[in-house]
């Protein structure tokens, strides 16, 4: 009997020790498990710009009056350059204009070489798939350019069977290629198309209407003309381009643009450049 009681007592002590050990192990396990640190929120593009105190702006040298190289000052100037300077003032940072080929503007955004695009770039659905845009700054379409003595080409339909030029990276080139009855030629710059037109290697070319107006007015000896009465096929809006998903930067730029529209700053810029 005594042996039986001793066995039961020993068994109870063992169970108590086992339960205590399990409880202790459970408690210690909870204490030793490191707490997971919350992931750091990546700084936004707007935060980066304000932290650096400068916004990098991609602009071309071939888009007068939107962006062009002033040979007297060797600086890029124009409508969208002035807009970029005003935007930087509203954002409270300095502006750094970076010379960029038109066809390289979007890739430069994607590779983070620039923060925004401020040029004569139309906001198209295709471009909106890879970058975001601000609210519109200006609306325009293409102009049809022919040699000064050419009176046979008056409308888009007259381009059938003709050799027609357009600049690389523009919607005009993309859309022209859809017309298989037109022999489409691509060029890096408008100046190249003017030379080709004057030499008779193309019959006409399509280019940004306001750019050609300014170019022809400033250079009376070009011997080319815009076709009067030509109906624009692909009108669109110009805005500020930026990388995808930067809602805070987009809002800040949109707010600045709306302020510029209301206080007359944008009208002053457009008037300065004949728009």
Image: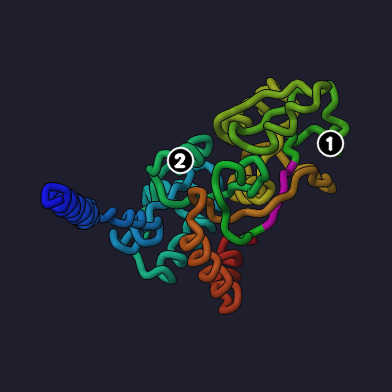
Q: Please identify, in this view, whether the residue under mark 2 or under mark 1 is nearer the observer.
A: 2
- Nearest to the observer: residue 141 or residue 219: 141
Task: Reply above or below: 122 against 269.
Answer: above
Q: Residue at x 45, y 44 (%)?
A: 109
Number of other residues with Cα within 10 Å of mark 2, as a class: few under 14, some 14 to 19, many 20 or more: some
Question: Image quadrant for the C terminus?
Answer: bottom right
Q: Position of residue 219 (x, y in %)?
A: 59, 45
Furthest residue in direction front, as rendered: 1
153 with respect to 9 (left or right): right
Q: Quadrant of residue 227?
A: top right
Q: Residue at x 70, y 51 (%)?
A: 236
Per the model, the C-alpha gap separating discs 2 and 1 is 35 Å
Magenta part mainly helix, strand or loop?
strand
Task: Reply above or below: 54 against 226.
Answer: below
The total of numbered circles placed on residues is 2
Q: Residue at x 32, y 57 (%)?
A: 38
Task: Reply above or below: 171 against 179.
Answer: below
Specify which label sits upstream in the sequence, 2 or 1.
2
Q: Secondary structure at mark 1?
A: helix
Give the extent of the magenta segment.
139-143
Q: Are marks 2 and 1 in contact (CB under 8 Å)?
A: no
Residue 156, disc: 1
Furthest residue in direction bottom, as rendered: 263
- Nearest to the observer: residue 140 or residue 7: 7
Residue assigned mark 2: 110
């Amino acid at each position: 009997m005594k042996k039986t009681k001793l066995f039961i007592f020993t068994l109870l002590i063992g169970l108590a020790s086992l339960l205590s050990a399990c409880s202790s192990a459970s408690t210690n396990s909870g204490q030793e498990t490191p707490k997971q640190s919350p992931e750091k929120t990546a700084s936004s593009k707007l935060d980066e710009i304000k932290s650096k105190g400068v916004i990098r702006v991609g602009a071309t040298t071939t888009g007068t009056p939107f962006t062009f190289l002033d040979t007297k000052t060797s600086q890029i100037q124009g409508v969208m350059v002035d807009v970029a300077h005003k935007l930087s003032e509203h954002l409270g940072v300095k502006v750094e204009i970076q010379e960029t080929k038109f066809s390289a503007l979007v890739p430069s955004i994607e590779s983070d070489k620039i923060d925004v695009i401020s040029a004569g770039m139309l906001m198209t659905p295709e471009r909106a798939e890879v970058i975001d845009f601000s609210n519109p700054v200006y609306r325009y379409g293409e102009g049809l350019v022919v040699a000064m003595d050419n009176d046979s080409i008056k409308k888009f339909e007259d381009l059938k069977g003709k050799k027609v030029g357009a600049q690389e990276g523009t919607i005009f080139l993309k859309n022209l290629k859809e017309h298989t009855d037109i022999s489409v030629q691509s060029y890096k710059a408008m100046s190249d198309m003017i030379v080709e037109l004057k030499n008779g290697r193309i019959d006409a070319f399509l280019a940004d209407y306001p750019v050609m107006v300014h170019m022809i007015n400033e250079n009376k000896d070009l011997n080319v003309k815009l076709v009067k009465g030509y109906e624009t096929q692909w009108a669109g809006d110009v805005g500020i381009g930026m990388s995808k998903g930067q809602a805070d930067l987009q809002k800040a730029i949109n707010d600045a643009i709306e302020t510029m529209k209301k206080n007359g700053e944008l009208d002053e810029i457009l008037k300065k450049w004949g728009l």
